[in-house]
Amino acid sequence: MLPQAYEIPMALVLVLAGVLACFAGYRLFRIVLAIFGFILGAMLASSLMGISNAAALVVAALVGGLAGAVILLLAYFVGIAIVGAGVGLALKRRR
């Protein structure tokens, strides 16, 4: 988890990203996925670090955040491929 000083700002970022996803819809879906991936990756990476070294904590959060954003963006494309394959299979079996 993040240090207690960062929990409120991260919660606000998550709420704002959720509002953005709610009202902007599909147009910004990949951007919202990247934001959520960044935050989740930063939270996971910073939970593995000790809180005694602030510089290492920030570096780990940035690296983990970037990795999380890339993972969720790639998962988006994998999900589209799986749905497309399922639709193709359903159409093939229908004939």
Image (cartoon, rainbow, N blue to C red):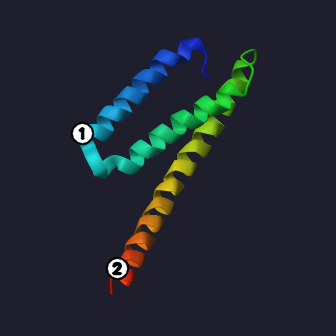
Spot occupied by residue 95 in the image (x, y as percentages of width and height): 33, 87
- Is residue 44 depicted above or below 91 in this figure? above
* Of 83 and 12, the residue lying toward us: 83
- The disc labelled 2 sits on which kind of residue? Leu
Q: Is residue 93 left or right of residue 74?
A: left
- The disc labelled 1 sits on which kind of residue? Phe
Spot occupied by residue 67 in the image (x, y as percentages of width and height): 61, 45
Spot occupied by residue 12 in the image (x, y as percentages of width and height): 40, 22
Q: Residues within 10 Å of mark 2 (few under 14, many from 20)?
A: few
Q: In 3D space, how far apart are the residues under numbered discs 1 and 2 (Cα atoms)?
A: 33 Å
Disc with the residue nearer the chain's start (1 vs 2) = 1
- The residue at 40%/50% (across/down) is 30
Give the image quarter of residue 51: top right
Q: Which residue is mark 2?
A: 91
- The residue at 40%/42% (across/down) is 32
Number of marks in picture: 2
- The residue at 31%/37% (across/down) is 20
State the SS at label 2.
Answer: helix
- Specify the label residue 83 is tagged with: none
- Specify the label residue 23 is tagged with: 1
